[in-house]
Image: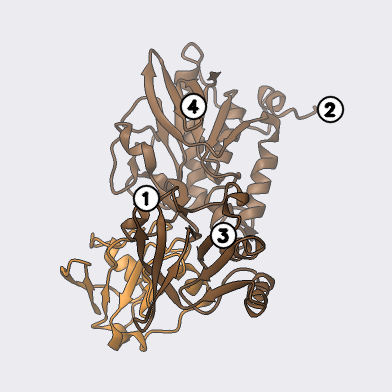
Amino acid sequence: MIKTDVLIIGAGPVGLFTVQQLGLIGLKAEVVDNLDKIGGQCIELYPDKPIYDIPALPECTGESLTKNLLEQIKPFKTNFHLNERVQEISKEKNNWKIKTSKDKIFIAPNIIIAGGVGSFEPRKFLIKEAEKFENNGIYYSVKDKNYFKNKKVCIFGGGDSALDWAIELSKFAEVTLVHRRNEFRGAEHSSETAKKFEKEGKLKIKTPFQIISIEGEDKIKAITIKDEDGKTEKITTDCVLGFFGLIMKLGPIVEWGLNLEKKHIPVNTENFQTNKEGIFAIGDICTYPGKLKLILSGFHEGALAARGCFKLARPNEKYRFEFTTTSKSVHERLGVKKVD
Amino acid sequence: MPKITYIEHNGKTHIQEVPNGLSVMEGAVQNNIPGIDADCGGSCACATCHVYVDEKWFSKLPKKENAEEDMLDMAFEANKFSRLGCQITITENLDGLVVKMPSKQA
């Protein structure tokens, strides 16, 4: 069990900056994120795309912004709990008890939801048989590549994951790579390697094809694929791997009794609290009149939510507004050396 | 103002006036037309504003950029008339455009 002042859900830019805002006023935060890395959408969706509207940074990228934010919160030695999703919350006296997908328990008076559009999950096959075979023939990630040894494997997708796994698994499995168009968007050398392997008979490539059905009772026997002109082909296979990237899902948040408006959480603009005391929502996930989905708006929302958290984390203290330029206690928290 | 026809997967049709400069995605989202999610808010980063453009109209649209083609890989039931609604900007020339929404965005 971990006790903290604030549990932040989401390690995107807004969650990170809020760690700093909390740290400046002496509050400790723990951060949980379902992704395996820090940075949220900035890292997952557009690490290399330039961003031009961060105040005082004429141009940066999702990756450099994340790096700088991590640098800025270094003094606060924050714990990140990655690859973990917050599943359940319940009220215990003046605290929230928070349970994650790894059964970790947090006790905190405040929760700040900075979850973007939800947690990232693999995009799945949409045909209905796919659900039946999920984790029993249909997979969206490779946990142990040896599992596929000497099996017939169909890999779907055109990005790096699909290409890399097709190349890797072709060393000891019978691989067919299927993609909806002739071009692969993964790294050029990977797509060249795959095409070279195809020529050498090490793997098969089927483009432009998409899956239309799966056959089998207890396990998969075959799949049928279709091209753009409606021509179909049947492939006998033991398993199917889908690499269609990640999608954002709101997930368990919908069950916490929060008001929701079209996948967004309404908040007041005084401290960004939701309809539940001690639960705040900031960044892309919150909504209020005039809301802009900008990173800079999220920073402002985090600053105000942090002050909102102070009240519940330090009920017997009075919050004092201080500037980072002059406040001694802020300097101590930042570990800044005094210059006389 | 250009009129855009949005057809839901179940056939329900919405004819919507959309001002020049907005995207096909924004035209739907701002008018509560179901079938377009637009999770990423229009930055060509999520493929949840996937639409099938009417065959007659498809060739009249400005060509797809690579980034859009890459994102369409993520839209599962994409076909040769697939586009992302956020990447189609409404102009007078698109008055009468017809788009269909897939059964699911994700």
**Distance between the alpha carbons at the discs numbered 2 and 1:** 76 Å
Quarter of the figure with residue A75: top right
* First in residue order: circle 4 vs circle 3: 3
Quarter of the picture containing the C terminus of chain A is top right
Q: Is residue B14 left or right of residue A314?
A: left
* First in residue order: circle 2 vs circle 1: 1
Say which mark, if any, is on residue A340.
Answer: 2
Local packing at callout 1 (Cα closer than 10 Å; few below 14, some 14-19, many 20+) is: few
**Residue name at image x 60 percent, y 68 percent:** A186
Amino acid bearing label 4: Asp
* First in residue order: circle 2 vs circle 4: 4
Local packing at callout 3 (Cα closer than 10 Å; few below 14, some 14-19, many 20+) is: some
| Residue A212 visible in this rendered orientation of the protein | yes
**Residue name at image x 27 percent, y 62 percent:** B35
**Distance between the alpha carbons at the discs numbered 4 and 3:** 31 Å
The answer to whether marks 2 and 1 sit on the same chain is: yes
**Position of A81 relative to B74 (above/below):** above
Amino acid bearing label 2: Asp
Local packing at callout 2 (Cα closer than 10 Å; few below 14, some 14-19, many 20+) is: few
Q: Chain of mark 4?
A: A
Residue at image mark 1? A218
Residue A32, how many percent across, how many down?
A: 53, 35
Residue depth check, mark 4 versus mark 1: number of the one nearer the observer: 1
Residue at image mark 3? A46
Element at label 3: loop
Element at label 4: loop
**Distance between the alpha carbons at the discs numbered 2 and 4:** 49 Å
Chain B painted colour: orange
Residue A100, how many percent across, how many down?
A: 47, 30
